[in-house]
Image (tube, grey):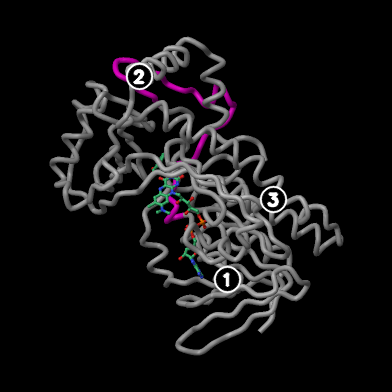
Amino acid sequence: MRTQVLIIGGGPSGLLLGQHLSNAGIETIVLERKTKDYVLGRIRAGVLEIGTVSQLRDVGAGARMDAEGMVHDGAVISYGDAQIRIDFAAHADAAVMIYGQTEMTKDLYDTREQTGGAIIYDVDGVEIHDAKTSAPYVTYQKDGTEHRIDCDYIAGCDGFHGVSRQTIPMDVRKEYEKVYPFGWLGILSETPPVHHELIYASSDIGFGLCSMRNENLSRYYIQCSIDDHPDNWSDGAFWDALKRRLPQEHADVLITGPSIEKSIAPLRSFVCEPMQWGRLFLCGDAAHIVPPTGAKGLNTAASDVFYLADALRRLYRDGDKTGVETYSERALSRVWKAERFSWWMTSLLHQFPDQTGFDHRMQQAEVAFLQSNVNAQKVLAQNYVGLPY
Ligand code: RFL
Ligand code: PHB
């Protein structure tokens, strides 16, 4: 088999890239290790930046998001007794879209199926060969048989645990990492959201986040210990812990109910440089991870895709190699800014096990500055809705 761009990974990065390229008449095949149902069963991000929203519209996968997504033009930061509403409309002249990653991925699958794009599910043992030559190829197993696909370029969209990043030799690759000493316990419940906007709440017993998927589906998180397990948390214990982290006026009106999903995510900042090696390009979680505070994971994946799709279109259409040659530099420049923002939000709002009195005072001073300084609110708003591509 042969294709122009072989995409490893059928998560949001791989599917969005595939759609950009198919729409430009560039042939692609997506290889996915899991089944479609498995990919669609993962509950992850919920906030789409303006750039992610416009890309979904541009590739023709934005109709359901526009009909069902919720436009938010602000969010609340609460810290102890302080409550600060960050006005995205006033400070960044923009809004974010609340639309689950699961829904976005489903829309991208549907669009790919309607436009006849190839996806091969359930593949095993994917290996990348000759990425430094002009004739790279990928081998994999499916149903016990070995297969080979030759291609011009390979997009590694296979997430943090994929093979693509590992293919780049260690003497070329530099990795930067920070592991946070806590996780997030998240639940999904068929209850109305406690507030019409997201609440990021820092309290002396830890962080809590109130998010949502629609008017009757809420997503809540609490900071938990890194070695905790969802089975240690009854629904009742979760709701009690969340209420204790929220401002009283919100805790008083929180509607609770049975959880329909409960899981723990570890918090990590990670960047791999470079994001390109010969004809292999990394996109999304394959190259970088952010802690979820600030909702940048999926959105940073989408900005990588924007740069790579632009580069490959220019190459195939005009023979212009500039985009592919500068992809890593362009993508990383934006990635590091999202890393900074997510690290800052995480550091500001969580209780750290080894936090000193001085560290606590620094958080308080930062919050007081944010509360009183419109420029600080502007910086937060502009980062939250997404920096320009
Ligand atoms: P994904 O979504 O991990 O998709 C990668 C796809 O590649 C497949 N794959 C392979 N396929 C073929 N061969 C191989 N060898 C393969 N290895 C892996 C996988 O099955 C998968 O389908 O990466 P992508 O597309 O780059 O998208 C990135 C986003 O998914 C990610 O940034 C966010 O979901 C991060 N994230 C969150 N971000 C937020 O902004 N807000 C959140 O609340 C939030 N919650 C989360 C998250 C990530 C989590 N993970 C990864 C553990 C919660 C969790 C639990
Ligand atoms: C979510 O809705 O899952 C969500 C929202 C905002 C975040 C992280 C997660 O910062």
What crowding class fits label 3: few (fewer than 14 Cα within 10 Å), some (14-19), or many (20 or more)? many
Residue at far front of view: 171
User: Judging from the image, what secondary structure is the residue with disc 2 in?
Assistant: helix
Q: Amino acid at mark 3?
A: Ser
- The percent coordinates of residue 76 (x first, y second) are 39, 25
Q: Earlier in the sequence, mark 1 or mark 3?
A: 1
Q: Amino acid at mark 1?
A: Val
Left or right: residue 103 versus residue 158 is left
Toward which corner of the image does residue 169 lie, by quadrant? Answer: bottom right
Answer whether residue 81 is magenta in the image.
yes
Q: Amino acid at mark 2?
A: His
Residue at far bottom of view: 145
Disc 2: residue Cβ within 8 A of ligand 2's nearest atom: no
Tell me, yes or no, whether the two marked residues, 1 and 3, touch with CB atoms within 8 Å. Answer: no
Tell me, yes or no, whether the two marked residues, 2 and 1, touch with CB atoms within 8 Å. Answer: no
Left or right: residue 306 versus residue 38 is right
Which residue is label 2 attached to? 360
**Residue placed at 72% from the left, 65% from the top?**
279
User: Judging from the image, what secondary structure is the residue with disc 1 in?
Assistant: strand
Above or below: residue 384 compared with residue 247: below
Q: Which residues are magenta?
A: 76-103
Which residue is label 3 attached to? 328
Q: Earlier in the sequence, mark 2 or mark 3?
A: 3
**Residue placed at 52% from the left, 32% from the top?**
341
Which residue is label 1 attached to? 30
What crowding class fits label 2: few (fewer than 14 Cα within 10 Å), some (14-19), or many (20 or more)? some
User: Judging from the image, what secondary structure is the residue with disc 3 in?
Assistant: helix
* Cα–Cα span, label 2 and label 3: 37 Å
**Residue closer to the observer: 189 or 34:** 34
Label 1 or label 3, whichever lies nearer to me, is 3
* Quadrant in the picture for the N terminus: bottom right
